[in-house]
Image (cartoon, helix red, strand yellow):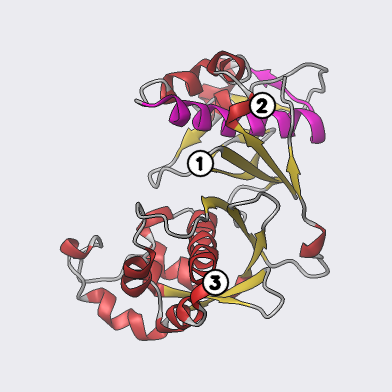
Amino acid sequence: MRIYAGNINRYSVDDLKALVSPNRWEHVKRFAFEADIKRGLLAAALLNYGLNRDFEFFTLDRNRDRKKASGDDNDRLTGVKVCKWIKYDEYMYLDDNKKPHLMIDGKELIFSLSHAGDYAVCAIAGLYEKGHDGIGIDIEVCERGNRKTDTDSIARHFYSEEEQSFVFADEDLKTENFYKIWTLKEAYMKATGLGLKLPTSDFTVRIKKDGHTAFFERNERDIESYVNQTSSAGQTDNKERDPEILTALEKTRGFRGRLFDDIDGYIISLCIPEIKNTDNDKIKVDIVEDLI
């Protein structure tokens, strides 16, 4: 497991544009503000950087006839080693829930991207068989007195009672604790592949006494209320529960969360499947000073 972080102020738009695919540039150039463009570019550049530096190198398989015969319309990467910078992000595609995917040599690359403020982050777990549990990473700016975010109101509307107790227990730590819960929720929602489709109130984040590890619990009391929720609450108005959401909630105990405070003023959270004999404390954030 590798985590990479970078600061957008170290690069110009042209610097970052040179490190990503034309597809990524087409996606981000429509943003109104330069900072948003740079964040989007840097996240993809960190993915390319990590795969080129720390993982096996691959070359493209563009055998269209063979792919058409197999029913695979996406460009794929196959395991022929080469020594050059590859723009892997060119071959990402989004599923119906807007989760990015990338297939390499018939396997799925498990990764996650996030950005906020001056930073972008990328987590890479490696190659796994398709259908393997995903991972999620989230980064947020953590500043007290930030009037742009009404943390108290958000916590009361979207956090469980237990989470609210954690947030409001200490006035001095209220903002920090709010973002710890928020980033862990975001990371779990990404790991399930559902993103914002998964209601934040359907599960509870529990942070351990060590302050940097967490686990997740399904909120059983919210199950019946979900069935009667309407689209006005931002959820489905179907009479039956979405099976994707039920599946995701059944897996809560199979994931673990990890908090990082390597960057001043920011909180980073990682959500990964629980794997026996794995020491999550060994996972570190690699703050990349220079991609060029």
The x and y percentages for residue 47 are 65, 34
Q: What residue is rendered at 49% in x and 33% in y?
A: 93
Q: What residue is rendered at 29% in x and 82% in y?
A: 224
Q: Which residue is farthest bottom?
A: 221
How many angstroms separate mark 2 from mark 1 (CA)? Answer: 33 Å
Let me know if residue 71 appears in the view: no
Q: Is residue 15 above or below residue 118?
A: above
* Label 2, residues with CA under 10 Å away: few <14, some 14-19, many ≥20: many
User: The residue under label 2 is which amino acid type?
Assistant: Leu
Let me know if residue 104 appears in the view: yes
Q: Main secondary structure of the magenta part?
A: helix
Mark 2 residue element: strand
Q: Which residues are magenta?
A: 33-62
Q: What residue is rendered at 64% in x and 51% in y?
A: 264
Q: What residue is rendered at 76% in x and 28% in y?
A: 52
* Residue denoted by label 3: 173
* Residue denoted by label 1: 117
Camera-nearest residue between 148 and 14: 148
How many angstroms separate mark 3 from mark 2 (CA)? Answer: 46 Å
* Label 1, residues with CA under 10 Å away: few <14, some 14-19, many ≥20: some
Is residue 279 covered in magenta? no
Mark 1 residue element: loop
How many angstroms separate mark 3 from mark 1 (CA)? Answer: 21 Å
Circle nearer the N terminus (3, 1): 1
* Residue denoted by label 2: 77
Camera-nearest residue between 177 and 28: 177
